[in-house]
């Protein structure tokens, strides 16, 4: 016999109305009461799928505060725009919420009273589980976690295409600048980088792999990392960077040092933000349809999934520009 809301009310000593509001994440309750109701519901085996889910009318677009920066906005702003355009077509209201692990996340979300949630970029597993406890439809964008529906660019293929291109234009000492390894997208791009070297029978040199931590002055960290690479006895003749902002900063460091790009050091970035094509020289990059990512996130929310998680992958494309080769007539221009 299945557990009912009345059973939960009896077990907690709360009213049926209070139990219902807690499970639906409605206002008028303390966080302590809401947490208690969910704990008892899980202990008693209450099926959250019993809650009626009507038409999605409001969606909260959640972005981790570490991505809510000037350096990240060229990627996530178009993603948000894509989600917003899809919502407008469907008659859905979209609200933006920047959140962090040390903040009362559920209280912030509840202020917007969404029917569904999009989480864009990296989120700590604990934070994801806290958001998931709301029992609202939820989709991850640019992140993958077991048990969650998600949409991601083909990061692994992108890393492979970027590195293979550098190999094909004759580069022998290819470095990689990556970000925090906890990020799914970065893990995948590093995997693609190493696979391309392996397939070309080139040894991966761990001294040519540098991780750039997330903090306030990322540009300075990237330039310092580039100078450290150039100081090695076997300095790299090419660098694949995990995103375009990193590539642009690293490339600037080389130019400031009096080196020529791509003659001395070639560069490939990832994401194909608008600044990539405007750079001097223009930056070769892996193109990601960022607006499509946002729109597909909304599409996944609107699908009836019967509780099953889905992982969707968005195709990527290599855009060749002057930062990686002078021989563009034989290659596709970006």
Image: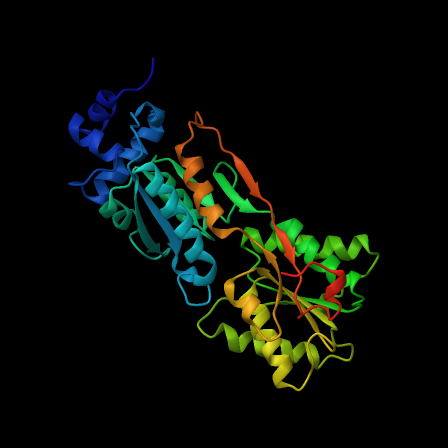
Quadrant in the rendering for residue 237: bottom right
Residue at 39 percent across and 42 percent down: it is 86
Q: What residue occupies the far front of the structure in this picture?
A: 329
224 left or right of 93?
Answer: right
Image quarter (top left, top right, bottom left or bottom right) of the N terminus: top left
Query: Would residue 162 be found to the left or right of residue 94 on screen?
Result: right
Question: Which quarter of the figure has residue 101?
Answer: bottom left
Residue 280 versus residue 3 in the image, above or below: below
Q: Position of residue 231 (x, y in %)?
A: 70, 82
Quarter of image, res 268: bottom right
Q: Position of residue 13 (x, y in %)?
A: 17, 28
Left-right relation of 85 to 255: left
Task: Tell which of 236 and 28 is nearer to you.
Answer: 236
Quadrant location of the C terminus?
A: bottom right
Is 234 positioned to the left or the right of 292 in the image?
right
Q: Nearer the viewer, residue 121 or 44?
A: 121
Query: For the view shown, which residue lies furthest in the right direction?
Result: 201
- Return the x and y of residue 23 as percentages of the image width and height: 26, 32
Residue 31 picture location, percent across and down: 23, 44
Which residue is at the front of the view, 225 or 74?
74
Report the number of discs. 0
Residue 272 vs residue 193, the one in the foreground: 272
Residue 14 in sight in this render: no
Res 251 seen here: yes
Instruction: Please tell me which residue is depicted at 31% across the width and 34% down the height of the picture.
Output: 56
Colouring mode (rainbow / by chain / secondary structure / one colour): rainbow
């Amino acid at each position: 016999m299945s557990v009912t809301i009345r059973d939960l009310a009896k077990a907690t000593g709360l009213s049926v109305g209070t139990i219902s509001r807690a499970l639906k994440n409605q206002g008028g309750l303390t966080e302590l009461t809401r947490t208690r109701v969910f704990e008892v519901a899980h202990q008693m085996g209450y099926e959250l799928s019993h809650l009626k889910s009507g038409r999605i009318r409001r969606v909260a677009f959640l972005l981790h505060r570490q991505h809510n920066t000037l350096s990240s906005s060229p990627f996530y702003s178009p993603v948000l725009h894509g989600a917003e355009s899809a919502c407008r077509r469907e008659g859905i209201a979209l609200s933006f919420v920047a959140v962090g692990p040390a903040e009362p996340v559920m209280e912030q979300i509840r202020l917007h009273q969404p029917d569904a949630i999009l989480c864009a970029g990296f989120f700590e597993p604990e934070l994801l589980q806290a958001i998931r406890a709301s029992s609202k439809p939820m989709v991850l964008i640019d992140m993958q976690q077991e048990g969650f529906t998600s949409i991601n660019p083909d990061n692994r293929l992108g890393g492979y295409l970027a590195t293979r291109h550098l190999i094909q234009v004759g580069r022998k000492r290819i470095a990689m600048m990556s970000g925090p390894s906890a990020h799914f997208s970065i893990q995948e791009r590093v995997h693609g980088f190493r696979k391309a070297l392996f397939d070309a029978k080139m040894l991966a040199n761990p001294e040519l792999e540098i991780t750039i931590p997330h903090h306030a002055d990322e540009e300075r960290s990237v330039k310092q990392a580039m100078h450290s690479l150039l100081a090695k006895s076997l300095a790299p003749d090419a660098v694949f960077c995990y995103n375009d902002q990193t590539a642009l900063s690293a490339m600037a460091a080389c130019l400031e040092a009096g080196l020529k790009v791509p003659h001395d050091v070639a560069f490939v970035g990832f994401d194909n933000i608008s600044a990539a094509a405007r750079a001097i020289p223009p930056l070769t990059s892996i193109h990601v349809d960022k607006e499509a990512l946002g729109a597909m996130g909304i599409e996944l929310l609107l699908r009836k999934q019967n509780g099953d998680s889905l992982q969707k992958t968005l195709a990527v494309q290599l855009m060749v520009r002057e930062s990686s080769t002078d021989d563009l007539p034989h290659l596709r221009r970006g």
